[in-house]
Amino acid sequence: MKPKIAIQGFEASFHEIVALNFFGKDIKTVECASFTKLFDVMKKDGADYAVCAIENTLAGSILPNYAHLRNSKLHIIGEVYLRIEMNLMALPNQTIDTIFEVHTHPMALLQCQLFFEKHANIQLIESHDTALSAKEIRQNNIKNRAAIASKRAAELYNLDILAADIHDNKRNFTRFLILSKSLHSEYQPDIINKASISFRAHHTPGSLAKVLTIIGEHNINLTKIQSLPVIGQEWQYYMYADLEFDDVAVYRKMIQMIEPFTTELKILGEYKQGIKLS
């Protein structure tokens, strides 16, 4: 039976590209119009695994997804860094001068601001998905409208690329997490050298500093730390941290040592560092 993979977006979306790269082509994707829907599908056993974007090198962190992840019972089993190529596409025989509107996901718009500063006459409209915006143009034969999406979307929906690689910075990567309902699956990594954790430091002076010091003393690389407020408790925060290490035993010893200085310590996943797909 083909594994069912929940993705945010639709066919030819960047999430689908990551799913095909990580799981292979023999899969069934479960398309979700939003990240909230994606986590809801996983909660209701509508899919076996999920692909979920968590941050972009230009637009930054997708903050709601940290809360979604912590509140779910899902486990991170892998990550993929995908180079994002934003392309402006429309029906054949259109030109940029004939385009009045561009529809795409808001994260895509954030990554292409410099391009549209040169085309101030074009109205930018947020949509649920990059690939779906391209599909709507083809299905409804909409002239004078363009979408920002992947080259795969242009090929799939027979659209012309009016401008390629329009993102602000060519080193534009999105980090995607691979999520599983179970700690044990056929896609479990053979090597563990990265972990994601969340916790609350005790609300006493120096508690967070002690946690960070212990991490450093164990020669563990803190590659990201992100704070999110605790809803209903003013000035209280959850901390989310990504840790890279060479020795998993040393990492687990560190976890034991920071526990007395934290509350609600949760291991979100232990996995293998992702490769960058170009």
Image: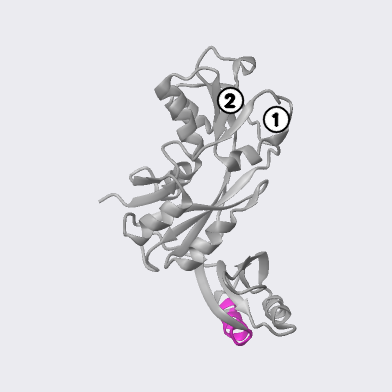
Residue 112 falls inside the magenta stretch: no
Residue at the image position 42 percent from the left and 39 percent from the top: 10
Q: Earlier in the sequence, mark 2 or mark 1?
A: 2
Image position of 54 (left or right of 110): left
Disc assigned to residue 73: none
Identify which residue, 141 or 6, lies in the foreground.
Answer: 141
Q: Which residues are drawn in magenta? A: 250-261
The percent coordinates of residue 227 (x first, y second) are: 65, 66
Disc assigned to residue 115: 1
Indicate whether 28 appears above or below 187.
above
The percent coordinates of residue 197 (x first, y second) are: 56, 71
Image position of 136 (left or right of 148): left
Q: Please state which amino acid type lies under the numbered disc 2.
A: Glu
Label 2 environment density (alpha carbons within 10 Å; few <14, some 14–19, many ≥20): some
Residue at the image position 49 percent from the left and 21 percent from the top: 159
**Which residue in the protein does label 2 denote?**
101
The residue sitting at the top extreme is: 93
Identify which residue, 135 or 51, lies in the foreground.
Answer: 135
Label 1 environment density (alpha carbons within 10 Å; few <14, some 14–19, many ≥20): some
Viewer can see residue 186: no
Indicate whether 201 appears above or below 111.
below
Q: Please state which amino acid type lies under the numbered disc 1.
A: Phe
The percent coordinates of residue 226 (x first, y second) are: 65, 64
Which callout, 2 or 1, points to the residue nearer the camera? 2
Image position of 154 (left or right of 23): right
